[in-house]
Amino acid sequence: RRLAEAEAAVTAGDALLGLEKAELLAEEAQAVAYWPVIAESLLLKARFESSLERSELADTSLAQALEAAQAAGHARVAASAFVYRVRVAGYQQADFDRGQRYAQYAEAALSHLGQPQELAALLAGHRGAIFFEQGRFPEALEAHVDALELWTEARGPEDPKTGVALTRVGDVLLETGDLKAAAARYEAALEIARRQYGETHPQSARLFSRTGRVLMKQGESTRARGFFEQALAASRATLPPDHPYLATSLSYLAQALVAAGDYEEAMDNYRQALAVLEAAEKPDPRRLSAVLSGLARTSSSTNDYAQAARFYGRALELRKEVYGDGHVLVGEAVFNLGEVAQNQGDFERALSFFRQSLDIWRRAAPDDGFLIAAALTGVAEALLGLGDSAAALPRLEQALGLHPQGREAEFVATTQFALARALVAEGRESVRARELAEGALEGFRGGRALSGEDAREVEQWLETHFAGR
């Protein structure tokens, strides 16, 4: 009965209370040497520690739960411990090889239990999370769809676990640019969370954030800000002040503030997020790199390019530490450094960074037209800066053909405007160059607020080259 009471805190979203109950229960079970409940209480303790992002403690508790389960002959807890170690080691600690090894152990343990649906669903979701972190999005999508089907069959379409699985499917779709499909999954998951938990539950907070992210990518930063503010309020109401997800909520809100031109408030939010993460005994390098990148983008928006380069440089080192040299996110950090160098007028250095990012993305995400187009445009703009419009032209034509529908308008506009400039520099197709620049102007005007300066640059260029024509 008391074990069930402790587990009820999972549904309530009160991980601190649940952890307190599970720790007390584990101590009492150990005092009477009743191994089945020792195993179950240690497993529950680990789940709460994982929920609180205390992955080192969770890893230790899972190892102890596994030993107790083996001593008690409690096969289901032993299998569960392997399943949760996939998440803790492979996702939370970003030890991908160890996570996949535990996944193999978990599969073997589940096969002896007749593949219980809920544990199989958990395992599929945890494996999907590892694939996602590795940038292996097709495999991540397949795993999360498997988890969604299993949860729907086991608990029905309105269960919170089904909602979490919907959310994970949406995450992959968002990352691969299918904004409409991602938004549909998030909307369905948010409705489940609202009905089952209310609006001040951690799961609701995460879904407010995700909805905001979709809106940001669609250029609707004002609406996104409202969702991010709801997410931050819910996070503060339900999570301890040192929980890493508070940093995530602060960072998302800061993104919307940057888009609105509120740079000072954005920097304040990012610095609060950085303080939350750096206060941890072992800060998560992935979250740190995300916050540092946000600080860098905000610094760039205020033309403090030296500070932006320092923040991006730290983010790049952290990402290499986690992912190695060839991951999509490492390519992103290199690309960002290229943009800073370009803004500083150092086109040789920018060209080097953009070529590195193009090489990384071609190997890590060869089918992602958006990333390849962005890198090609970066290379071409650096070449334009160096006066080599002939070399820039074919790269820009290729980039324009690669841009997928539905992605941020200002990225397409950047390619269009660069191509217009290259055509004029080569004395070619002035009618097309004007049409491209006018299309870029429309894209920048319809994009985020921070695209206003780009729009003014295009207007000035059109005035200079096509006034009266």
Image (cartoon, rainbow, N blue to C red):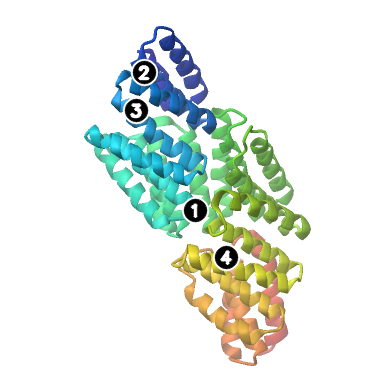
Mark 4 to mark 2 CA distance (whole Å)? 53 Å
- Residue at 52 percent of width and 69 percent of height: 372
Residue 4's mark?
A: 2
- Can you identify the residue that label 3 sits on? 78
Q: Quadrant of the C terminus?
A: bottom right
Q: Position of residue 379 (x, y in %)?
A: 62, 74
Residue 181 position, x and y percent, is 39, 55
Give the mark, 4 or 2, whose residue is nearer the N terminus. Answer: 2
Residue 102 appears at what percent x and percent y? 39, 39
Question: Disc 1 marks which amino acid?
Answer: Val
Mark closer to the observer (3, 4): 3
Where residue 338 sits in the image (x, y, percent)? Answer: 67, 66
Task: Indicate whether 277 appears above or below 374.
Answer: above
According to the picture, the residue beneath numbered tag 1 turns out to be 214
Q: Nearer the viewer, mark 1 or mark 3?
A: 3
Q: Mark 4: which secondary structure? A: helix
Asked whether disc 1 touches disc 2, contact meaning CB atoms under 8 Å apart, the reply is no
Task: Please name whichever residue, 202 or 278, is drawn nearer the observer in this view of the structure.
Answer: 278
Q: Earlier in the sequence, mark 1 or mark 2?
A: 2
- What numbered label is drawn on residue 446? 4
The residue depicted at 69 percent of the width and 37 percent of the height is: 275
Looking at the picture, tell me which residue is in the foreground, 297 or 208: 297
Q: Nearer the observer, disc 4 or disc 2?
A: 2
Distance of mark 1 from mark 3, alpha carbons?
39 Å
